[in-house]
């Protein structure tokens, strides 16, 4: 959505406002205001014309406008009812130089998890990919993934879901997965060129449409306002990535992995022991029989405590 349209929505949210008033405030013509109002109506916003001016009477349930409306984070939202993969689209935008775009979809038909695993994305989910071009060495990219996990877990707790993070970035309720995150990047040795953080949240979807190891927000607490959840997530993600030193404390707070026995499949073999801490930029410290080991990537499984 362009900046003028966003400003029109902001002034409409403060009560009735006339076309000439908006035109003067925004320094555009009255015809331009009228064109923006029509475009907003087409995007699903109900805007009444009354004697005392325009009044916003309802906001669409889910889409670019409904997420951007009231969003206090610097993202433009590109919305698709259905798309193959929001990460693929975000990569395309990133390659052509975009920054600060969030690609959002109601449904994906060819979504990917890590290592090209399939990611079920029925209609009703929050399928989101954020494009950023941070000044960051590639080795520090995991902090963005952890930030996305924290932002997702906190947005879910906000609506009453008992969400916890499993290292590094799955969000679960108990043992069932509710959010998966796929971060992709391109860069040189010392600096990231772009980064795409893909977040898949099983929101208003039936549990029968996701794998049996998964759960959904609908199953946990019923349907939620997806636009509000997406806004919360984008705002917290922006806050955390602006102050990276806040990510690990917030991650420890939301994670269930620390203090647990874990088995981590890493590219260099299996690491089994107690997860004792997480270190910048997202390294898991595991106390094993052979001493402490640091793991920076891998699939993690929570084990039952020994003796149970
Ligand atoms: C992930 O991979 O958890 C990353 C998923 C990222 C999906 C988002 S959606 C928006 C963006 N666009 C994309 O194309 N991708 C991103 P991984 O840790 O590899 O987990 C994949 C495994 O999770 C699969 O092999 C299934 O076992 C399971 N799975 C598949 N769909 C699921 C779902 N909807 N909910 C929970 N688990 C699922």
Image (spheres, rainbow, N blue to C red):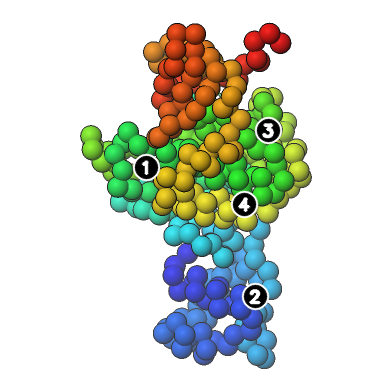
Q: Which residue is mark 4?
A: 229
> Of tags 2 and 3, which is closer to the observer?
3
Q: Earlier in the sequence, mark 2 or mark 1?
A: 2
> Of tags 2 and 4, which is closer to the observer?
4
Q: Secondary structure at mark 2?
A: strand
Q: Earlier in the sequence, mark 4 or mark 1?
A: 1
Q: Are marks 2 and 4 in contact (CB under 8 Å)?
A: no
Q: Earlier in the sequence, mark 3 or mark 4?
A: 3
Q: Which residue is mark 2?
A: 56
C-alpha distance separating marks 2 and 4? 21 Å
Q: Residue at x 62, y 68 (%)?
A: 45
Q: Residue at x 58, y 68 (%)?
A: 42
Q: Which residue is mark 3?
A: 173
Classed neighbour count for the residue bearing mark 4: other residues with Cα under 10 Å, few (<14), some (14–19), many (≥20): many
Q: Earlier in the sequence, mark 2 or mark 4?
A: 2
Q: Secondary structure at mark 1?
A: strand
Of 60 and 266, nearer the camera is: 266
Where residue 49 appears, as percent x and y from the top left, is: 65, 83
Q: Secondary structure at mark 4?
A: helix
Q: Residue at x 53, y 42 (%)?
A: 250
Of 84 and 166, nearer the camera is: 166
Number of numbered markers? 4
Is 161 placed left or right of 130 in the picture? right
Q: Earlier in the sequence, mark 2 or mark 3?
A: 2
Q: Secondary structure at mark 3?
A: strand
C-alpha distance separating marks 4 and 1? 22 Å
Using the image, tell me which numbered label, if any, was put on residue 50: none
Q: Is residue 67 above or below residue 143?
A: below
């Amino acid at each position: 959505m362009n900046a003028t349209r966003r400003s029109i929505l902001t002034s409409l949210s403060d009560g009735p406002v006339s076309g000439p008033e908006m035109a003067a405030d925004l320094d555009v013509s009255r015809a331009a205001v009228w064109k923006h109002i029509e475009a907003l109506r087409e995007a699903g916003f109900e805007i009444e014309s009354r004697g005392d001016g325009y009044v916003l009477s309802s906001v669409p349930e889910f889409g670019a406008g409904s997420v951007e409306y009231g969003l206090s984070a610097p993202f433009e939202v590109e919305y698709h009812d259905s798309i193959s993969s929001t990460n693929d689209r975000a990569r395309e935008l990133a390659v052509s130089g975009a920054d600060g775009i969030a690609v959002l979809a109601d449904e994906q038909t060819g979504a990917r998890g890590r290592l090209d695993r399939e990611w079920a994305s029925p209609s009703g989910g929050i399928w989101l990919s954020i494009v950023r071009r941070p000044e960051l060495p590639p080795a520090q990219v995991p902090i963005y993934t952890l930030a996305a996990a924290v932002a997702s877990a906190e947005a879910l707790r906000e609506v009453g879901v008992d969400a916890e993070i499993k290292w590094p970035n799955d969000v679960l309720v108990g043992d069932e997965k509710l959010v998966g995150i796929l971060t992709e990047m391109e860069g040189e040795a010392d600096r990231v060129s772009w980064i795409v953080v893909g977040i898949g949240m099983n929101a208003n979807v039936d549990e029968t449409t996701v794998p049996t190891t998964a759960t959904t927000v609908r199953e946990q607490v019923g349907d939620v306002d997806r636009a509000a959840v997406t806004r919360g997530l984008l705002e917290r993600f922006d806050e955390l990535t602006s102050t990276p030193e806040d990510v690990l404390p917030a991650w420890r707070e939301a994670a269930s992995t620390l203090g647990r026995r874990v088995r981590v499949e890493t590219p260099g073999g299996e690491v089994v022991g107690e997860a004792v801490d997480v270190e910048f930029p997202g390294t898991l410290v595991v106390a094993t029989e052979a001493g402490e080991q640091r793991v920076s990537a891998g699939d993690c499984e929570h084990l039952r405590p020994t003796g149970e």
